[in-house]
């Protein structure tokens, strides 16, 4: 899929990876880019920078996602690429309060479900479309110091896998973005944490990796190439991998999101 002349929606567009996506897609000649965020001023600033359209949406609420998709389809045109990128992190383990578990679940997982629920029938009817969901390398490996983040990012990958195998015959392509540490507001102050063990990447190379993956129509977007090796080590000897993660937990387990 080429992005020239396409209508694209990006959530979490006020800063970080989402903002970088919008700017990079504009450089590819996208017809229209909708910059979505709960931060109205941030979304408007991104849209102004690359000539897009800003919309205020809290992706923790299905009704807001559905209303936004309906508005884009009615006023701008059929969505070719939907980047469900917004996400949050919560530090801690099983002791994290239920309300925090629910909020991170809604944003990191259910927002992808809700977007697909609204878009898949429309895309299937017109013969295809593209869904790019942001997960994390934590979804392939795990996250020291944050059970809610590791669990929800695993779930996001499971959902993307299911959608790829279920909707592919309807012409709907699915990719999932799985970077390690990226310099964003979420990682500010955690430059020395375990996720940055292979370095802190800027958002722009992550957006570039997304463009290349969409062009190739492959499933995994892995800006940090080391992740493949970690995945292989995990699959080859799960117990040894867990032992290595326990060592990292002893060193970095005090992560404070």
Image (cartoon, rainbow, N blue to C red):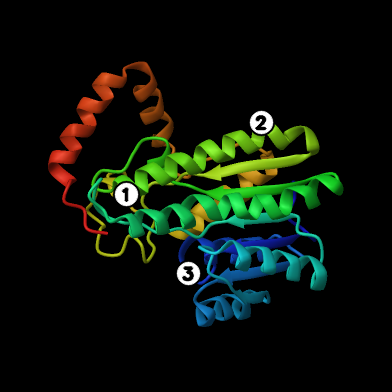
Residue highlighted by disc 3: 15
Q: Viewer-proximal residue, 214 or 92?
A: 92
Q: Residue at x 32, y 55 (%)?
A: 98
Q: Give the x, y percent position of residue 57.
A: 57, 71
What SS does tag 1 mark? loop
Q: What mark, if any, has residue 97 been given in the picture?
A: none
Q: Residue at x 85, y 44 (%)?
A: 127
The answer to whether the residue labelled 3 contacts the one labelled 2, judged by CB atoms less than 8 Å apart, is no
What SS does tag 2 mark? helix
Q: Residue at x 81, y 69 (%)?
A: 74
Residue highlighted by disc 2: 165
Q: Residue at x 34, y 53 (%)?
A: 200
Mark 3 or mark 2, whichever is nearer to me: 2
Q: Give the x, y percent position of residue 140.
A: 42, 35
Q: Viewer-proximal residue, 242 or 47?
A: 242
Would residue 144 appear left or right of 138 to someone viewing this image? left
Q: CA distance from mark 1 to mark 3?
A: 20 Å
The C terminus lies in which quarter of the figure? bottom left
Name the N-terminal-most of marks 1 and 2.
Answer: 2
Residue highlighted by disc 1: 199
- Dot 1, crowdedness within 10 Å: few (<14), some or many (≥20)? some
Q: CA distance from mark 3 to mark 2?
A: 31 Å
| Above or below, comparing residue 232 to residue 141 in the picture | above
Q: Give the x, y percent position of residue 242.
A: 25, 27
Q: Residue furthest right?
A: 126
Would residue 8 appear left or right of 46 to someone viewing this image? right
What SS does tag 3 mark? loop
Name the N-terminal-most of marks 1 and 3.
Answer: 3
Q: CA distance from mark 1 to mark 2?
A: 33 Å
Mark 1 or mark 2, whichever is nearer to me: 2
- Dot 2, crowdedness within 10 Å: few (<14), some or many (≥20)? few
Q: Give the x, y percent position of residue 114.
A: 61, 54
């Amino acid at each position: 899929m080429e992005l020239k002349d396409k209508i694209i929606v990006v959530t979490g567009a006020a800063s970080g990876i989402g903002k970088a996506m919008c700017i990079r897609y504009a450089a590819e000649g996208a017809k229209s880019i909708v910059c979505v965020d709960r931060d109205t001023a941030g979304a408007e600033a991104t849209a102004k920078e690359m000539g897009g359209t800003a919309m205020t949406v809290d992706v923790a609420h299905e009704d807001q996602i559905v209303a936004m998709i309906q508005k884009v389809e009615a006023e701008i045109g059929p969505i070719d690429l939907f980047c469900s990128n917004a996400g949050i992190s919560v530090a801690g383990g099983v002791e994290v309060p239920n309300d925090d578990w629910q909020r991170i679940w809604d944003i990191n997982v259910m927002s992808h479900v809700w977007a697909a629920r609204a878009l898949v029938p429309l895309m299937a009817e017109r013969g295809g479309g593209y869904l790019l969901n942001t997960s994390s390398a934590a979804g392939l490996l795990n996250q020291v110091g944050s059970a809610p983040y590791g669990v929800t990012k695993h779930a996001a990958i499971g959902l993307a896998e299911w959608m790829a195998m279920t909707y592919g015959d309807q012409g709907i392509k699915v990719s999932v973005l799985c970077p390690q540490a990226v310099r964003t507001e979420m990682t500010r102050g955690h430059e020395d944490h375990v996720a940055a063990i292979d370095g802190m990447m800027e958002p722009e190379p992550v957006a570039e990796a997304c463009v290349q993956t969409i062009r190739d129509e492959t499933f995994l977007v892995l800006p940090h190439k080391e992740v493949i090796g970690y995945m292989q080590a995990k699959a080859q000897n799960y117990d040894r991998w867990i032992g290595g993660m326990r060592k990292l937990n002893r060193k970095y387990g005090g992560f404070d999101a």
